[in-house]
Amino acid sequence: MSRLTANAPKYMASFACIGSACEENCCHGWSVSINKATFKRYRDCKDDDLASRLKENVVRREGSGNPTADYARIKLQADGNCPFLSADALCDIQGKLGASALSTTCSTYPRQYNAVDAALSLTASLSCPEAARKALLDPEAMDPVQVETDFAHPTAVPLSLGLRNISRDPVSAARWRVHEAAVALLANPTLDAVEALVLIGMLTRRVEETIATGDIAGLPAEVDKAIHLFTAPMTVLDARQLISGLEVDLRLQMLLLKELTVEYIVTVGGRPSFRSMVVDAVNGIAYRDDDVAGSAERYRAATETWFKPFVATRQHLLKNYLRNDVQRTFFPLSGKEPGMRSFYELAVRFGLIQMYLIGLSAGLREGFDEASFVRVIYTFVRNIEHNPAFLPRVIELLGSNGHLNLATMMTLLKV
Ligand code: SF4
C-alpha cells in the first residue's frame, strides 16, 4: 500500500458516504465499467448466490474502446437500479467480497482525483447529495487542507485529469495561472459570486486575446499584467460598479435559460428528481407561455423578495459551488476547448442554477432554505453536468445565435 497526500478542500477530510440514509443513492441509472482484473475476480467468486448474479449481470464488452478499464459493464435492472443493491440500499458485492472488489467507479465516486505533475488533488462531484451538503453549507468547506489516502500503488490512482510538464508549454502555463487567479478571486470574501465570475471572465478573455496574437515570448509578462489588473482593488471596485449599474433584462434571462432547460428535458429527459425540481421552479413563478410578461414580473419579484435577501448573508452557498467546480475541472484548462469556452460553460451552468433557485424561492418563500440549494445543485450536477454532450451543444447554439460573448453572459448571471 502507498500512502499518498492530496491537496483538497476541507470538506473532503470529513466526507463519507451515508449509504442507506442517502436521499438518492448513486446505484441507479449509471453505467459502471468493470476492469479486466475485477471481472476475473467476479468469475472466481465462491459464494454461489452472488457468483450466479455476477455471471448474469456483469457482461463482457465485446469490441470495447478500452479493453482493460472498460472490460465489462454492470447490466442495470429495468427500473435503472443496480442489480447488486440490497433491499436496505447497501451493496451486495461490497458486503460479500469487501470494498476491494468494487469497480473503480463505485470505490471512487464521488471522489475525483486530479494531478498536476506530481501534485495530487482531491475534490468531489456535487452530484452526490452528501458531498453537496458538505461542500456548500459550511462557509469554510473550501479552505485548503491536505488529506492522506491509501492506494495499492502510486500508479493505481484513478485520475480524472492529469497535467504534465505544464511549465514547458507557455500556453498551458498561462492558463494555469488564470486557474490560480480564478481560485483566488473566488476565495476573496469581499467579492460576491457574480462579481468574482465576471472578473474571471474578463481575465480569461484578456489572456486568451494575448494567446491569440501568437506572441508566445511576451505571454508571461502579459499574463502578469492581466492578473495584476483584474485582481487589483481598484478593478474590483470598478467591476462592482459596472455590474451594479448594469440594466439586466430579467425577461430575456428567464426566457433564454428556460429554453435551455426545455431543450435538455426534450432531448435528454433527465432523472425524475431533476425534472421534479424543474417543475417546482416553474410552478414557483407560475410560469405561463401565454403570459411571458407576467411570468417575468413574478421572476423579478421572487428575485428581489426571496432570493437576493437569502443569498446576501450566505454567499458561500453559490461561491462554494464555483470554487469546487473550478478546482475539480482545472478551469480554464478542461472541457472540449480550454480558454473562453470553459468560461462560457461555467457561466451558463451558474445562470441555470440561479434560475432554478429563484423559481424554488418563489414557491417556498420563507421555506426556501439551504436544503433547497443542495437539492438544486446535486440534481443539476447529476443531470446537466454529467451529460457530456449537452453543454457543448448549448455553447454551439449560443455561438450560432451570436450570444457567445461576455455581455450575454452578464445578462445570464446578474439578477
Ligand atoms: S450519492 Fe453519495 S451519499 Fe449517496 S450513496 Fe452515493 S456516495 Fe453515498
Image: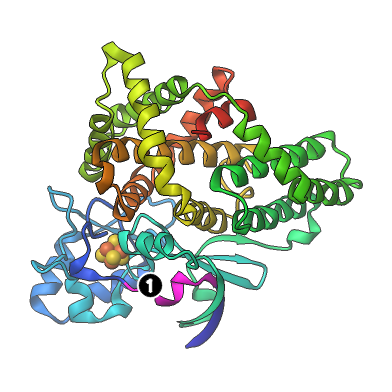
Amino acid at circle 1: Phe
Q: Mark 1 points at which residue?
A: 15
Q: In this view, does 24 lie above or below 290?
A: below
Image coords of residue 354 (percent x, y): 42, 39
Element marked by disc 1: loop
- The part of the image, by quadrant, that contains residue 341 is top right
Q: Is residue 21 above or below residue 204?
A: below
Residue 13 belongs to the span the image colors magenta: yes
Image coords of residue 220 (percent x, y): 86, 51
- Depth order, front residue of 393/328: 328
Task: Please state if 235 lies on the left or on the right of 196 as rendered.
Answer: right
Image coords of residue 34 (percent x, y): 33, 63
Task: Kindly identify the residue that appears in the image at 29 percent across and 55 percent down.
Answer: 371
In the displayed orientation, state which residue is furthest to the top.
Answer: 290
Task: Please state if 176 lies on the left or on the right of 309 as rendered.
Answer: right
Residue 35 belongs to the span the image colors magenta: no
Q: What is the span of residues highlighted in magenta in the rendered image?
A: 8-16
Task: Kindly identify the residue that appears in the image at 44 percent across and 56 percent down.
Answer: 66
